[in-house]
Amino acid sequence: MSDQPLLSARDVSVTFDIRRSGSWPWTPSLKLHAVNSVSFDIAPGECLGVVGESGSGKSTLARAIVGTVPTSAGQILFDGEDLAAMSADQRRRHRRDVQMVFQDPLAALNPRMTVGEIIAEPLVTHEPRTPRAEVKKRVAEIMERVGLLPNLINRYPHEFSGGQCQRIGIARALILRPRLLICDEPVSALDVSVQAQVVNLLMELQRDMGLAMIFIAHDLSVVKHISDRIVVMYLGTIMERAEADVLTTRPEHPYTQALISSVPIPDPALERARPRLVIEGELPSPLNPPSGCVFRTRCPKAQNSCAQAKPETIDLGNGHGVACPFHKAEDVLAAAG
């Protein structure tokens, strides 16, 4: 992997204006803080895992990188170019270089198009002068590459299983040979055995094609398997970031510790006997996030000072950062590893 980042996010924030139902036109809109001052780098060929509860801003961050939602503050740099300052031609190139695989495999596919038409659509859009014979050849090649028989090219999405539909989505994303692939919870709607197949396929494709990847998921065990580094998000803010092995064996933030505690152990005896760190309460509304540390309302280590100011990220070395001044390595559950 190169030391030069392919993608850099610098204090990226995404805020949505929400109007109350039945409010007057002059009534100020509410601000929904989906992503707050998020920063990270991704090197070519690297896989960055992003984990967190539903509502933590993972998917909004992915869509900001793709360019489907605007950022409210900060910069997203792709290969050194600021997305916000790109011309129309540069944006078209960016769309070729950054592709996305979605959570619901069947809903992401047009039911009125054949598999061949679905996979070929990005190629026809971005390379309209490509001969039809070449398009068909490249579609057949990428179908075979993701584990689909080329003779299925004229079938429709409803004729495939969930795992096969996700392979179609992956083929569609890769036919343009992108440099960055964003996978937004690509296995959460699949059976466990199929999840493993799709994750192994993505790892193989990343290695063979030299792809950089952002892999978004809830399950830390899946993210650890595929990722080089992991960032943990809560209510639009990064709580902790580290290399995958370090974060899953020596988590420092209470939220990361709770996420790891929720991952089941295959041994029933160990699973019943191990201590568990359970997060109490509900996720606060992003329309009215807590002051200071956004996790303080559910944190077992919270103190009065946590409400005063947003905690700075403490650098623990080797790229390990934690946004908590009261972290202690000895608090990690013994069973977490």
Image (cartoon, rainbow, N blue to C red):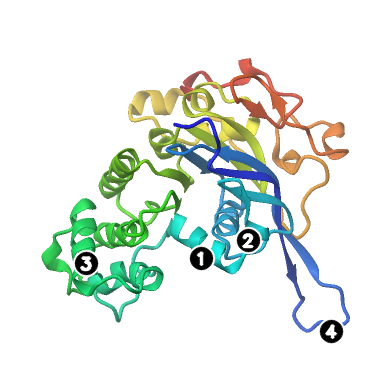
Residue denoted by label 1: 92
Kindly state the secondary structure of the residue where label 3 is placed.
helix
The mark nearer the N terminus, 2 or 3, is: 2
- Residue 134 is labelled as 3
Q: Please name whichever residue, 332 or 48, is drawn nearer the observer in this view of the structure.
A: 48
Measured from the top left, where is residue 222 in percent x and y?
40, 39
User: Can you tell which of label 4 and label 3 is closer to the viewer?
Assistant: 3
Residue drawn at 22 percent across, 74 percent down: 132
Residue denoted by label 4: 25
In 3D space, how far apart are the residues under numbered discs 1 and 4 (Cα atoms)?
Answer: 36 Å
Q: Amino acid at mark 4?
A: Pro
The mark nearer the N terminus, 3 or 1, is: 1
In 3D space, how far apart are the residues under numbered discs 3 and 1 (Cα atoms)?
Answer: 22 Å
- Packing grade of label 3 (10 A; few <14, some 14-19, many >=20) is few
Can residue 98 be seen?
Answer: no
The mark nearer the N terminus, 1 or 4, is: 4
| Residue projecting furthest to the left | 151
In 3D space, how far apart are the residues under numbered discs 4 and 2 (Cα atoms)?
Answer: 33 Å
The mark nearer the N terminus, 4 or 2, is: 4
Residue drawn at 39 percent across, 73 percent down: 125
Kindly state the secondary structure of the residue where label 4 is placed.
loop
Measured from the top left, where is residue 145 in percent x and y?
21, 51
Q: Please name whichever residue, 231 or 78, is drawn nearer the observer in this view of the structure.
A: 78
Q: Amino acid at mark 3?
A: Glu
Residue drawn at 35 percent across, 74 percent down: 128
- Packing grade of label 2 (10 A; few <14, some 14-19, many >=20) is few
Q: Is residue 49 left or right of residue 27?
A: left
Above/below status of 37 relative to 107:
above
Residue drawn at 55 percent across, 46 percent down: 79
